[in-house]
Image (cartoon, helix red, strand yellow):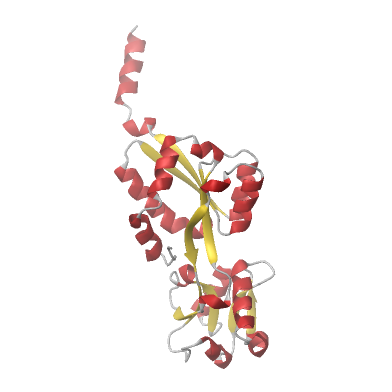
Amino acid sequence: MRSLVIALLLSLSLDSSSFAAEVRLSVAASLTEAVKEIASGYEKKVADVKILPNFASAGALAKQISQGAPADIYISANPKWMNYLVAVKLIPAEQVRIFACNSLVLAGRPGQDVTSLGDVTKLRRIAIASPKSSPAGQYAEQALKAAGLYDKVKDKLIMAQDVRQALIYADRGETDGAFVYKTDALLAKEARILLEVPQELYDEVTYPIALTVSGVAKPEAVAFAEYLKTDEVGCILKKYGFVVR
């Protein structure tokens, strides 16, 4: 009897957060810093809800969800994997919307004589994520070709494994510049944004978001998804360099 009373008292003394409802997010890794801040702010507003984000590549997350991993909300780094989950009926098509957009910039150390995209022909070495494997590299190649500059600079291009490595080359001064996402450029230590690539030269970089089938049935997930549409969240995204429609 005594042990039963002790157990009851212990259960009553547990922090209320132990009983908080959980909302599980599967989020593209490039949104890590922004989503962590958004989740932390929401938990302070809504004490009985715990936001549990899982950060990885959009493709890896989509495969996890398709294999049964728990997820109430999915935020992809491109439409491809969102469309895949819609096709396999794990996300209702009507739930999909654009959460944020990114943009392409040329980053490099200050002092470069670059005021327009045409000035990249003056640079000696330009880092670019490999277009064979990186969307950022594909966007950069697309923009250069659309501007009629690709053939003029192709011998100056230094291929990086991914967009973060391209930024490192420019940040260290190993290249005069690097085509990267704006959100990446804002993380640089030495490099700065030299210019923003005109949007009309490349496809828009979008981050689609949607409630999953299980998320639609969870009130806490629906409420958090609505919060993600607010101006407060938009301000946080903008702080990290994302574009909000």
Left or right of 127 in this view: 224: left
In what quadrant of the picture does the N terminus appear? top left
* Closer to us: 146 or 51: 146
Q: Identify the residue shown where x is 33% and y is 49%.
A: 41
* Closer to us: 109 or 100: 100
- Decide: is 101 above or below 92: below
Left or right of 107 in this view: 13: left
Q: Identify the residue shown where x is 65% and y is 76%.
A: 159
- Decide: is 241 above or below 71: below
Q: Position of residue 126 (x, y in %)?
A: 58, 83
Q: Identify the residue shown where x is 61% and y is 49%.
A: 62
Furthest residue toward front: 94
In what quadrant of the picture does the C terminus appear? bottom left
Q: Position of residue 135 (x, y in %)?
A: 61, 67
Q: Position of residue 213 (x, y in %)?
A: 55, 39
Furthest residue toward top: 1
Q: Position of residue 240 (x, y in %)?
A: 41, 64
- Decide: is 84 above or below 142: above
